[in-house]
Image (cartoon, rainbow, N blue to C red):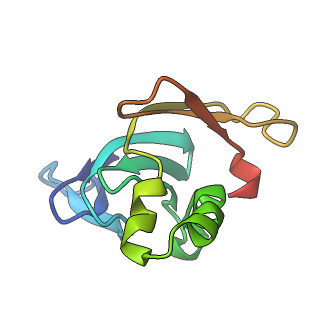
Amino acid sequence: LLVTCGADNAMKVWIFDQEDGGARLLRSRDGHCAPPTKVRYYSQHTLLSAGQDSSFRIFSTIQDSQSRALSQGPQAKKAKRVVANPHEASSLRLPPVTDFAAGSARERDWSNIITCHQDCTEVYTWEYKRA
């Protein structure tokens, strides 16, 4: 399998099973509003992706309905309290993810995903099970 992403903001999974050794599109997943910049396998059928749109997403390679975004909920709540203009609320979102790491061992016990963000000195942790 080969996973690609590009300017169409989609991730595509290709399988090389043609008689001539060529690839065919197996699945395509949409969800980012800007091109994904980092994509990694989390498990056999799950991808984690970060995009220029500041989103961090989980994509299922089997069933699209299981795909979801990791929420920036606290920032959204803060935006409602602090910002009167909805256009200013986007400034409270975390900057784009520049790198991330994840481990599935004991994912039910603690945060198991860590992200680094553009121009931030802090890292953020996420819980896969709560996504």
Q: Is residue 64 above or below residue 107?
A: below
Position in image of residue 67 (x %, y %) = 54, 66
Is any atom of residue 46 visible in this view? yes
Q: Residue at x 12, y 52 (%)?
A: 20
Q: Is residue 55 visible?
A: no
Figure quadrant of the C terminus? bottom right
- Measured as percent of width and height from the top left, residue 65 is found at 57, 76
Q: Name the residue nearer the viewer: 121 or 27.
A: 121
Query: Residue 21: where, in percent of width, then height?
Result: 16, 48
* Foreground pick, 43 / 111: 111
Left or right side of 29 for 110: right
* Residue shown at the point (33%, 57%) measured from the top left: 53
| Left or right: 31 as drawn, with respect to 36 | right
From the viewer's side, name the closer residue of 100 and 73.
Answer: 73
Q: Residue furthest top?
A: 121
Please tell me which residue is depicted at 36% across the width and 67% down the height of the picture: 27
Give the total number of marks visible in the rendering. Answer: 0
Instruction: State the residue in front, 40 or 122.
Output: 122
Residue 83 to residue 42: above or below: below
The part of the image, by quadrant, that contains residue 74 is bottom right
Q: Quadrant of residue 97?
A: top left
Q: Position of residue 41 (x, y in %)?
A: 49, 41
Residue at the image point whose x is 15% and y is 59% from the top: 7
